[in-house]
Each structure stands twice: as structure tokens, then as C-alpha cells.
Image: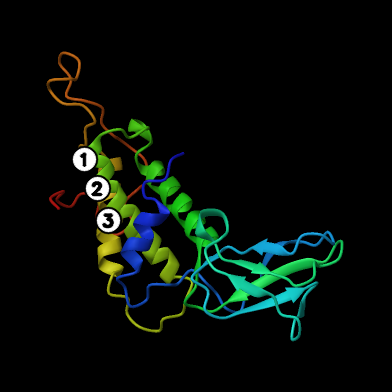
Amino acid sequence: MAAYATRADLLAAISQDSQAKLSTDPSRRWVCGTGDGIVTTFTTPFLEITTFKVYVDGTLLTASIPTLSRGTGTDGRDRIVFAAAPTVGQVVSVSADASAINVDVLDSVLASVSAMIDGYLHAILPVTDTALLASLKAKAILFAKVTLRGRRNLEVVDPIEMEWKAAVRWLELVAEGKIQISQGTPDTAPDGAEGDYAYGSFEPVFSDPDEGTSL
């Protein structure tokens, strides 16, 4: 399964949002590795750490705290560097401030929303049409933003809730065959066909299935 949007796509979108960086829970520790008495550098799942805490075997370090090496890990992840290597078997974990970006969370969310979209479009997978992929990327980013926001108790009416419902309803109508989407054209499809269409999947959730299909 391929993601309909990349991490870079999502970061570009959420960086414009007042609730942009919702992927990091500062109260949660993330395991970065286990000591072997030799390795001093450990890669975190974070980008753009401002403040952080390091734990060894669950104990918060208050002395000999590792230094931060920004952007030097895999895919630009931040790393921490110990002056002396943790001993064999010691588990190293890290928490970061809420403004940091946890790329493991972003990747997991993108995979999840792409699987959800696939559930509606199973009849025409894999999607190859350029225009349709562009439309689905926008929807995947929207679904990912909603999912990330759901990790927080915002205690306000979320302004993108209706947009999310409209996007889900569009997928439902496609799955029901009320909106036809094609990956072929009259010029490229076999004689008598207009392309491959998606029919049948999930039942409608937000409105009457017999309502009009114009969006």
C-alpha cells in the first residue's frame, strides 16, 4: 500500500496551521535504543526539538545530560549524544516539547488514512490517474490533520470538521457508485468502456443514501 500523501506534503500543510505540531506528546517517552557500552549517539523520532528530557532505564537524567545534535539522524531526525555510553542493556528513551515533530507519528497517521481511503476505492486499486491522485492527496492530508488533532483535547469546535465530513461523504458516494471516477479516458479505454470505476464499499454515515449526489 502506497501513501496518498508524503510526510513532506503533510508538514507543508500543517506548518500553516495554528494547531500545526500535534504529533508530539511531551508527557510520553519514546525508546531510542538500548545501551551496549560503546554507542554514545541515539536517534530520536523527532524533528525540531527545542527542549527534551532523557531517561535511562526509566530514570530521568538530571546530570551528565546528553547534548542535542539537530537533524543529523535518519531523514533529518534529531539525535542525542552521551558523553559516556550507556551500559549494556540500559534502555534510552526521550521526551520532547510539544512544538517538536514526531515523524514516526506522522508516518503512522499517513499510512492509516491511506488504508482508509483504499477501503473505499478497492474496486479500482491501484490508483494511477494523475488528477485523481492529486485529489486524494488533498483528502489524505485533511484526514491526517483531523487525526492529529484528535490526539489533543482542544475543547473548541474544530473548524475543519465539516470539511472532513464532506471529504468522507465524497468517498462514500464514490464507493456507492453515485459518483463515478475513472482511471481511463474514452481514448485509452477499451471499446465500449470509459475506464475503471469504483462501486460498492461502505454504507453512508452522514446523510440519507437516497439524497442527491451533487457535490
Mark 1 near mark 2, Cβ–Cβ under 8 Å? yes
Q: CA distance from mark 1 to mark 2?
A: 6 Å
Q: Secondary structure at mark 2?
A: helix
Is residue 75 visible from the viewing direction of this image? Answer: yes
| Above-or-below relation of 212 to 155 | above
Q: CA distance from mark 3 to mark 2?
A: 10 Å
In the figure, residue 10 lies in which quadrant?
Answer: bottom left
Q: Which amino acid is tagged 2?
A: Ser
Give the residue at mark 1.
Answer: 131
Give the residue at mark 3.
Answer: 167
Is residue 28 visible from the viewing direction of this image? Answer: no
The tag earlier along the polypeptide, 3 or 2, is: 2
Give the residue at mark 2.
Answer: 135
Name the residue nearer the viewer: 16 or 199: 16
Provide residue 6's location: percent of width, then percent of height: 39, 51
Q: Which amino acid is tagged 3?
A: Ala
Left or right for 99, reference 33? left
Name the residue nearer the viewer: 74 or 13: 74
Q: Nearer the viewer, mark 3 or mark 1?
A: 1
The tag earlier along the polypeptide, 3 or 1, is: 1
Provide residue 1's location: percent of width, then percent of height: 46, 39
Q: Which amino acid is tagged 1?
A: Ala
Q: Secondary structure at mark 1?
A: helix
